[in-house]
Structures are given as structure tokens and as C-alpha cells.
Image (spheres, rainbow, N blue to C red):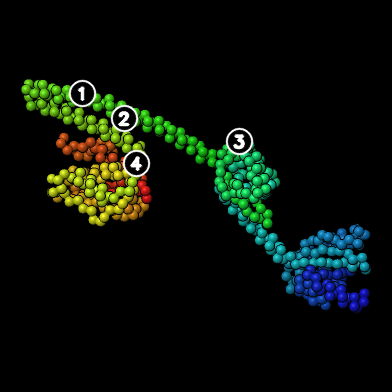
Amino acid sequence: MTKLGELQLDTVMDGVIDGIIMTNRQGEILSFNAAATQIFGYSKEEVLGKEITFLILQSEQEKYFKYLYNITDEKIAVLYRKPCRTGIELIALKKDFTEFPLELSLSVLPCNDIVLCTVRDISERKQADLSIKSYVEHIETIMDTVLDGLITIDMKGVIHGFNSAAENIFGYSARDVIGRNVKMLMPEPYQSEHDSYLDNYHATGDKKIIGIGREITGRRKSGYLFPLELGVNEMTVQGKTMFVGTVRDISERKAAESAIDSYIRKLQISNSELDQFAYIASHDLKEPLRGLANNALFLEEDHADTLDSEGLRRISRIRFLCTRMEKLVDSLLYYSRLGRQDLAVEEVDLNALIDNVAELTLPEETTQSVDLVIPAPLPHITCDKPRVSELFRNLISNAVKYNQSARKQIEIGVKASINPHTQVLEQQVFYVKDNGIGIDTCFFEDIFRIFKRLNEEDDAVRGTGVGLTFVKKIIERHSGHIWVESELGQGSCFNFTLKLGD
């Protein structure tokens, strides 16, 4: 080749991005382009005449010679006119002895048995591959720690990913399902529906079920069918549209829902029977009670002149007990209905409500010895007005009834307080506080039980023992709680929340 030809060839080779090294059959370097000098760090003058193997890590040289043998010997007749299209990866050495991954391909030129070596530093690609592999492993690790099953499929419904939770749910291993259509995990009609969803998406781009959770039936490896909650989202992986399905076995939830439905039906039947029983009991009990009371009255009217004072007292006692029993029956009937009747909710001004309750609860002669104080205006709340009126009526009545102070004090307000039932600071706690006889701590729960009375009272003032029971039930119907703070001889404070409408 002439000097001019060599110069032109060098110019062309130096313009190539890949490293180009030309050797003879013995491996001696004849040419070394500019890209090769950048890859290896050697100048052209430093390598010319040396064997190319000094650029390759010693442990990798056997791989190089085997590749060279396949190119230049057994197949040389074929490759004289057909460059090699595949290469190998080797670990090469830079001038500073730094090791790096190299992609090398050889071809034999038909002139003078020249071997053309094309080399490329693939350090960045290897690092990228390593990063991708690490990222994939990281994602797979995350997927395997997720409690829900995760299944990735392509546009044709072929499974590409199947995490550990999915394996546990369906009974298949990942290798059993990857590469197969996701339809294998569902029975009809969901198989056909799945096909129609994908076909519709292909044709129109309409994401009919994307991003929407729904319940379907899944099929385990054993063939067992079970309820499944499925959510599907779209993602793009390397420019390709993929779908990830989040699946959850809801067998236990469905069983629990079925059990709850069964309990509700039984409770509805029980409530209906209880209503019927309460009505019948009320009617059937009141009839003999009234008959007994009337006969006692007739006895008193007809034979008062023949009875002594003790006899008249006992007849009067019978009439009183009949009236009391009738009140107890009415209270029991009312309590049975209180927890089931719908609330007639409305916005209520508590200030006006309490004014009205106090006017009806505190007789004019009583108000002279009772101080009812509201330190700050009370809020407007959404509640059942008649029920909440009854609530305050019972608490105010008890504050007066169980109070031996010459000057009875009742304070009604709202405050922030820790709710002992939830251990949460409540910003709106209503309270009714008095300076009455107080309650021993051991009775803080008992006072809310129906017909439970702590004090002996004469017949003139004796109650039925249901007032605080009604109060508690009304508060619970308003999604609230009630608790008492009290000390014997120091008065009581009833605290409660009313959350309906918040």
C-alpha cells in the first residue's frame, strides 16, 4: 500500500467511534486508531509491533485464542469474504493496569491475512446492566414483601411477574405461570370478560377497569374457586405498556360479612319479637294491675268504715305498688324502643333547650333554693331535640333530688376533657355538675344499669331507677359516651359527648 493509501486509511480509522486494531495472523499489532488509544491509554507508537494479547487480562487470553482459532482456522475459507458478526466480552487492561470490560469482534480481511479487531469499552453498559439488575432485584424483593398478590401482564394478558403473595394465594409457583395467559387464574365468565377488556383497550384505548377495584372469582391450582378483590393499573416498562394487578383473597372477609348479615337478620327478628313481647307484656301486665288497683279502690270505698287504720294503709299501699308497677312496665317498654327508633335530628340551640327544660323540671318553689348556672353560652348542635331534652331533664332532676344542701347548685357547660373510654382529648364535652351527696367510685358503673337504685327513699319521691339508663342510651344513640366524676359529700359531675352531626 502506498504512503498516500496508508494515510487515507489511518484518517478513516481515526474517524471511527469504536477502537480498531489491525494485526497479522501472529497477533502483532499493525494499526491502532485514535479510539483505541483513548480506550487503552497507549499511543499508537507504544503498541505497534507488540502482540495484542498484552492488552488482555492473562486469565482471559484463553478465551481470546479460542475465538481467534474459530475465526482464522477452521472457518477461514468461509470468513475470508464474510466478516464475523458476533463478538465476545473480555476483561482488558489499560496502560495503568486498570481492568475493564471490553467487547471484541474479529474479522479476517482477504488481503495479506490481516485480522481486524473492533473493540469497545462496555464499562458504562455493564454498570448500567448491574444497576438495572440491582433495581430489578430490589423491586422483586419489595414485591415479595407486599402482603397483596402482585401480577404483571403484557397487552396480550401474558404473565411476566408473580410475587410470593400471589404464589400463596393461587398455589402456583412463579415458574408455573410466567409466560402463560392470566386467564388461567380465573373461571368463566371472568375469562371471557378479561378478553373483552383487553380487546376493547386495543381497539379504543378505553381504560374500562384500569384504576378501579372490583370483586371477581379466582381459581387456585387445585381448582378451588374463591372470592378475590382485584385492582388493575397501567405502567410503561421500556416503552411497552404493561399492567399490574393487585389481588387479595377476601374469603375471610366474605365469610365475616355473611356471618354479620346472618346476625343482623337474626337481630332484626329478635328485635321484632322483642317489640311484640314488650307490647304484649305491657298490655297483659297492665290489665291485671289495673284490675288489682281498681278492686283495692272499690274495697276502700265500700268497706272503709269497717276497716281499721292498718287495713286502710295496706289498701293504699296496694294501690301505690300497682301504680309503681305500671310505671316500671312503661319504662321497660320505652327503653326497649329507645335503642331502635330513628332519631329526629335537627339543629338545636342548647341554651333555649335548657331554659325550657329547667322551667318544666324546677317548680317555682324549688327554684328559690336552686342556682342553675351556665358559665358561657352553649353551642348549637345537631341532635334529636326531644331525646336531648329528656337527657338534661333527668340530670337536672337528679342534681336536685340527690342534694341535701340548703342552697343547691347546678352548673351546665362545655369543656375540653380526656374521654376515659377512648383516652382521647375531646374538645367538646358537655357536663352537668352539682353540689349534692356524691357517688362512691365503686358505683360509677352501676348507676347506669336499669332499675338500679343506690339510695333508700320514701314512696313520695322514690323513682324507678331508669333515669340514668335512659340518659346513657340517648347519648350512645348520638355516638357519644358518658362518665361521672364524683366524691361522697362533694357532689357529682356528669360528663358526656354528643357527636351526631359533627
Q: Earlier in the sequence, mark 2 or mark 3?
A: 3
Could you tell me which residue is drawn at 21 percent across and 53 percent down? 373
Amino acid type of the residue tagged 2 in the rendering: Ala
Residue beneath disc 1:
291
Sequence-wise, the earlier of marks 3 and 4 is 3
User: What is the CA distance from the residue labelled 3 to the residue labelled 4?
Assistant: 46 Å
Badge 2: how crowded within 10 Å, few (<14), some, or many (20+)?
Answer: many
Badge 1 crowding class, 10 Å Cα cut-off, few under 14, some 14 to 19, many 20 or more, is: few
Q: Secondary structure at mark 1?
A: helix
Under circle 4, the secondary element is loop
Q: The N terminus lies in which quarter of the figure?
A: bottom right
Q: Of label 1 and label 2, which has the lower sequence position?
A: 2
Q: Which residue is mark 2?
A: 278
Any part of residue 163 in sight: no
Q: Residue at x 23, y 33 (%)?
A: 327
Distance (Cα) linking label 4 and label 2: 20 Å
Q: Quadrant of residue 302?
A: top left
Q: Secondary structure at mark 2?
A: helix
Q: Which amino acid lies under the numbered mark 4 shown in the image of this protein?
A: Leu
**Residue picked out by circle 4:** 343
- Kindly indicate whether the residue at mark 4 contacts the one at mark 3 (C-beta within 8 angstroms): no
* Residue 465 image position (x, y, % from top left): 24, 37
Q: Earlier in the sequence, mark 1 or mark 4?
A: 1
From the top left corner, tell me how far across and down residue 405 is, in percent.
15, 48
Q: Name the disc covering residue 224, or none.
A: 3
For the residue labelled by badge 3, is the local secondary structure a helix, a strand or a loop?
loop
Amino acid identity at mark 3: Tyr
Q: Position of residue 25 (x, y in %)?
A: 89, 67
